[in-house]
Image (cartoon, helix red, strand yellow):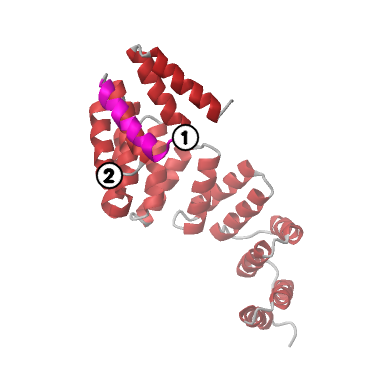
């Protein structure tokens, strides 16, 4: 019986398991012909077209879905969002992902997509909301917590940001250096140099050969007017990365602030030799 859609559906699955992508796709297309409007078939066919990067066929499929009445589908809205994103229509893609989240706020693929695109589009408030939704489903996802901490910091919600990085450090001790560094930077933005110094020192205890951390600590010392300590730490950083012009620039500024103009000039001239721009 060639008009039984389930036959084509099962045939497509068999082709797929044997790596016969073209034949499997044709079987799905035949299944949809015999069962028009079947949301599960449309969803599977959209996934196949996306995997094969068949944008023309995917466009035809979505045009077909717009011509008929379908029940709300988070999966299909998510796939449409991915398709629009591939076309560079990011705002439209974000709208589709938003629709998918409204249909089913527990659909992991949509949450991942809308979070990534929200960060790219700098939609801070919406992305914070979606990150909190995702963390309700998976509270141990340290990457989402990192994203949330960074966005809280951008909004000036420093205490919330610090809380997220502290949570990451508890969940994954291997990320403590990264977290203490992030918290130190947050306190620098808050102009709380005592706490910034505390966290940079905690990070350095775990990563004593991390040049960026040594430079950060030196920068904090300079902000506190502890110039000798600052020079020591930045020189320690330069011992690890002698041609880093950021570290050299920081050191030159300290000498300039101290009134040691000859040493500041020497370092600035060295920076120009390394990078004439």
Q: Say if 115 sits above or below 57 in the image.
A: above
- State the residue at coordinates (46%, 34%): 244
Q: Quadrant of the C terminus?
A: top right
Q: Which residues are magenta?
A: 226-242
Q: Where does residue 266 sit, x and y in percent of width and height?
A: 45, 20
Relative to 24, 135 lies left or right: left
- State the residue at coordinates (42%, 44%): 147
Q: Is residue 234 magenta?
A: yes
Magenta region, main secondary structure: helix
- State the residue at coordinates (62%, 43%): 90
Name the mark on residue 166. Answer: 2
Q: Is residue 76 visible?
A: yes
Q: Say if 14 sits above or below 147 in the image.
A: below
Q: Quadrant of residue 52?
A: bottom right
Relative to 85, 258 lies left or right: left
How many labels sit on residues?
Answer: 2
What residue does disc 1 label?
Answer: 243
Q: Say if 161 sits above or below 191 in the image.
A: below
Q: Where does residue 210 sit, x and y in percent of width and height?
A: 35, 43
Q: Where does residue 125 sit, x and y in percent of width and height?
A: 45, 36
Q: Where does residue 131 sit, x and y in percent of width and height?
A: 42, 47
Q: Quadrant of residue 60?
A: bottom right
- Give the structural element (helix, strand or loop) at label 2: helix
Viewer-nearest residue: 49 or 187: 187
How would you rate the neighbour count of disc 1 (Cα within 10 Å): few for under 14, some for 14-19, many for 20 or more?
some
Q: Is residue 25 magenta?
A: no
Q: Quadrant of residue 31?
A: bottom right
């Amino acid at each position: 019986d060639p008009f039984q859609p389930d036959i084509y559906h099962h045939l497509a699955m068999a082709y797929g398991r044997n790596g016969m992508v073209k034949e499997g796709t044709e079987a799905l297309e035949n299944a949809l012909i015999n069962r028009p409007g079947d949301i599960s078939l449309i969803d599977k066919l959209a996934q196949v077209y996306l995997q094969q990067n068949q944008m023309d066929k995917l466009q035809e499929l979505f045009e077909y879905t717009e011509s008929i009445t379908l029940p709300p589908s988070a999966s299909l809205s998510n796939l449409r969002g991915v398709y629009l994103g591939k076309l560079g229509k990011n705002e439209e893609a974000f709208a589709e992902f938003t629709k998918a989240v409204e249909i089913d706020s527990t659909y992991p693929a949509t949450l991942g997509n809308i979070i990534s695109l929200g960060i790219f589009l700098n939609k801070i408030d919406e992305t914070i909301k979606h990150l909190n939704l995702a963390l309700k489903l998976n509270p141990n996802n340290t990457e989402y917590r990192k994203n949330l901490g960074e966005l809280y910091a951008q909004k000036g919600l420093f205490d919330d940001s610090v809380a997220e990085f502290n949570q990451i450090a508890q969940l994954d001790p291997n990320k403590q250096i990264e977290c203490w560094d992030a918290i130190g930077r947050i306190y620098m933005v808050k102009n709380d140099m005592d706490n910034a110094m505390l966290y940079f020192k905690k990070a350095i205890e775990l990563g004593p050969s991390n040049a960026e951390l040594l430079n950060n600590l030196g920068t904090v010392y300079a902000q506190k007017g502890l110039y000798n300590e600052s020079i020591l730490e930045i020189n320690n950083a330069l011992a690890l990365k002698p041609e880093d012009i950021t570290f050299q620039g920081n050191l030159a500024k300290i000498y300039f602030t101290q009134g040691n103009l000859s040493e500041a000039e020497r370092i600035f001239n060295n920076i120009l030799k390394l990078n004439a721009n």
